[in-house]
Image: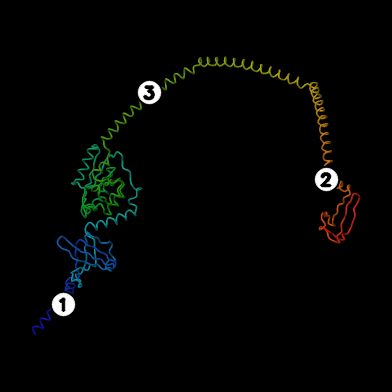
Amino acid sequence: MQSTDIQQDIYTVSRLNSEVRLLLEEGFAQIWIEGEISNFAAPGSGHWYFSLKDAGAQVRCAMFRGGQRNLGFIPRDGMHVLIRARASLYPNRGEFQLIAEIMEERGEGKLRRAYELLRKKLEMAGLFAPAHKKPLPQFPKCIGVITSATGAAIRDILTVLKRRHASVPVIIYPTLVQGETAAPAIVKAIQAANRRKECDVLIVARGGGSLEDLWPFNEEIVAHAIYASELPIISGVGHEVDFTIADYVADLRAATPSAAAELSAPDCGELLQALIRQKQQIWRLIKTKLAASKQQIEWTQKHLLQLHPKRRLLEKMQRLDFCEQTLVQLQKHFLNKLQTKVKDCESRLHRVTPLHRIQSLQHQVHVQQQKLISLMTTKLIQKQTQLVNVSGKLDGISPLATLQRGYAIASTAQQKIVRAAFDVKAGDKLKIRIMQGEIDCIVEKTSA
């Protein structure tokens, strides 16, 4: 009996893990737990596996694919999250784990996500458009500052303005710059400054801090208040690396509150140096202008002397003398040219007199006649000689000469000359040409 009881109290590993799993799931059916994600893994199955840890411990977690549908972000190592889960045990390895059903971002990561969503929303709405940016006054008559009256930002701004432009009045619109009520307070300060119209430029500023500290300047109501402001606004929130929604909407963004103060008012020292440089430049221009005017007057006086009537009269008289000399020279040249032309015409007229022309032509006719007679005689002799030679050659090769010697020429009916006996056969008709007449005959036989 005792042995049976002992046997019943012995657990198998599978039984132990199953009962422990049941106890865990019944005892911790739904809990909320906060921690930092580490060892995040997303295999091909679509399920997520990670560890959730704090400063003293960690626990294994799993989130199945079905619970990820409404999650607006992808978890990553180092992200601080809040999850709703149920405790369980993975029986195959006997490992305690949490099955996550809901997950939310916590801390700065959540704020970063909200910041990006709002920034994209306002950008699509046109609040960041450069066309809406208002120009800043070059020489403001009064500067308004919206910030904490006790913070370091106001001290930095006043110090910079005192150094750069001590004479410009500054109106402080004190407001909260941190906490849940800070955003409405900043909006009221902007609206009050626009309503009172005491200044012509506004600085919205606060010192550096975490994203959570600067969050009032990332609120949508603050962005719309800056966008609706009739006064130009310089945003000087945080340090150089900090960018808030207010920076994007403002007419000008400064890296720090001190930089915002520098951008809002001109530097009197620099203005004084610029005035001194401009004064020196004006004096140089005046001296240059005076020297140029003096030179112009001297040139004008010289020009007047050159245009004096007496001087011009002398020039005209000299011109007249020159024209007279030129006219005389031209007349002489023209007369000489005419005389040369007359002589040339007389010579040409003598050469073309009719009597002289007739004599010349008669002489040419006589000469040509002699040449023609000589050429005709020579040509006649040449032709007679050629005729004798050709006649002799023609007689030598003429068939008539052959016929005169008693020979005859036989030809067939086709007018083909018979040169050999085999050119014809018995019965062929032949025509025999002799010195006087022709004889038609028929071949009786041939012999070679």
Residue 12, disc: 1
Residue, disc 3: 291
Q: Nearer the viewer, mark 1 or mark 2?
A: 2
Query: Few, some or many C-alpha atoms within 10 Å of disc 2 (few <14, some 14-19, many ≥20)?
Result: few
In the image, residue 251 above or below residue 426: above
Task: Give how far across and how far down residue 189 sits, in percent.
Answer: 25, 49
In the image, residue 350 above or below residue 159: above
Residue 397, disc: 2
Tell which residue pokes out farthest to the bottom in this image.
1
Q: Which amino acid is tagged 2? A: Ile
Task: Give how far across and how far down residue 179 sits, in percent.
Answer: 20, 54
Task: Give how far across and how far down residue 334 sits, in percent.
Answer: 65, 18
Q: Which amino acid is tagged 1? A: Thr
Dot placed on the residue nearer the N-terminal end, 1 or 3: 1
Query: Few, some or many C-alpha atoms within 10 Å of disc 3 (few <14, some 14-19, many ≥20)?
Result: few
Say which of 353 and 443 sits in front.
443
Q: Is residue 340 left or right of residue 196?
A: right
Kindly report the distance in space between the C-alpha atoms of the residues bearing marks 1 and 3. 116 Å
Dot placed on the residue nearer the N-terminal end, 2 or 3: 3
Say which of 200 and 35 sits in front.
35
Kindly report the distance in space between the C-alpha atoms of the residues bearing marks 1 and 2. 153 Å
Q: Nearer the viewer, mark 1 or mark 3?
A: 1
| Quadrant hosting residue 102 | bottom left
Q: Report the number of discs.
A: 3
Residue at x 88% of width, y 54% of height: 432
| Quadrant hosting residue 357 | top right
Q: Which amino acid is tagged 3? A: Ala
Task: Give how far across and how far down residue 79 sits, in percent.
Answer: 22, 59
